[in-house]
Image (spheres, coloured by chain):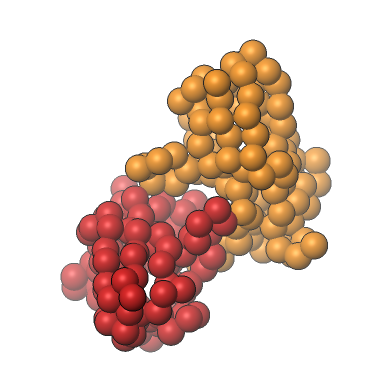
Chain colours: A orange, B red
Amino acid sequence: ETGVTQTPRHLVMGMTNKKSLKCEQHLGHNAMYWYKQSAKKPLELMFVYSLEERVENNSVPSRFSPECPNSSHLFLHLHTLQPEDSALYLCASSLRLAGAEETQYFGPGTRLLVL
Amino acid sequence: AQSVTQLGSHVSVSEGALVLLRCNYSSSVPPYLFWYVQYPNQGLQLLLKYTTGATLVKGINGFEAEFKKSETSFHLTKPSAHMSDAAEYFCAVSPWGGKLIFGQGTELSVKP
């Protein structure tokens, strides 16, 4: 595997379910990100991790819980979601956090549908 | 606060025609600017970025963009559109490391 991978690619869940999204980067990067992409809205940054420490939580509801056990893996744990949480969830990574010129590399995303 | 405006949510061109996708930004500090492309059912791929230096930036697949500070613009162009260019394009500004602020995206259609 190369680049940034995400699993599953598609997920359908009920509002009472608990599920997790997984992201893995094979680039040797130290920073990882979760974004939400909803129809007709700009991409929204959700969480930022640098060297496994969370450095930003962009006012995300507590029903979304991130976890970064090491610099290569990032999870997004989901519980009691709402239908408006249906979206494409994108993971990204960059070599470093510092430096606004850092390029972020994106995974293919997980398409989530909440019923 | 930084923001990005992409003019036109949908642009349609004929194959072989010029592609022009518009992006204007608002930034209180010298910006770092990016263009990403998203093909159907895929994540975002970096096309090009401006950090410092030459204001005309060349990217992949024949795209280029020019940073114009006086106009606060970073428009994306390609001289001749190809069918494979059909995708959604996102302009983004980065005020600090780890934070990308995206525009709403422009969907490019290419007609044969």
B78 left or right, relative to A94: left
Q: How many marks?
A: 0
**Residue in the picture at 34% in, 64% down:** B108
Seen from this angle, which residue lies furthest left? B71
- In terms of depth relative to the viewer, which is nearer, A104 or A9? A9
A115 left or right, relative to B27: right
Residue A59 is situated, as x and y percent measured from the top left of the image, at 48, 30
- In terms of depth relative to the viewer, which is nearer, A115 or A54? A115
Residue A68 is situated, as x and y percent measured from the top left of the image, at 74, 40
- Is residue B71 among what the camera can see? yes
- Is residue A74 among what the camera can see? no
The quarter of the rendered structure image containing the C terminus of chain B is bottom left
| Residue B42, image quadrant | bottom right
**Residue in the picture at 18% in, 70% down:** B71
| Residue B22, image quadrant | bottom left
B81 left or right, relative to A26: left
Residue B20 is situated, as x and y percent measured from the top left of the image, at 27, 74
Is B42 placed above or below A43 here? Answer: below
**Residue in the picture at 48% in, 81% down:** B61
Residue A48 is situated, as x and y percent measured from the top left of the image, at 60, 44
Is A104 placed above or below A68 here? Answer: below
Seen from this angle, which residue lies furthest top? A16
**Residue in the picture at 71% in, 27% down:** A19
- In terms of depth relative to the viewer, which is nearer, A55 or A18? A18
Is B110 placed above or below A90 here? Answer: below
- In terms of depth relative to the viewer, which is nearer, A97 or A6? A6
Is A63 placed above or below A54 here? Answer: above
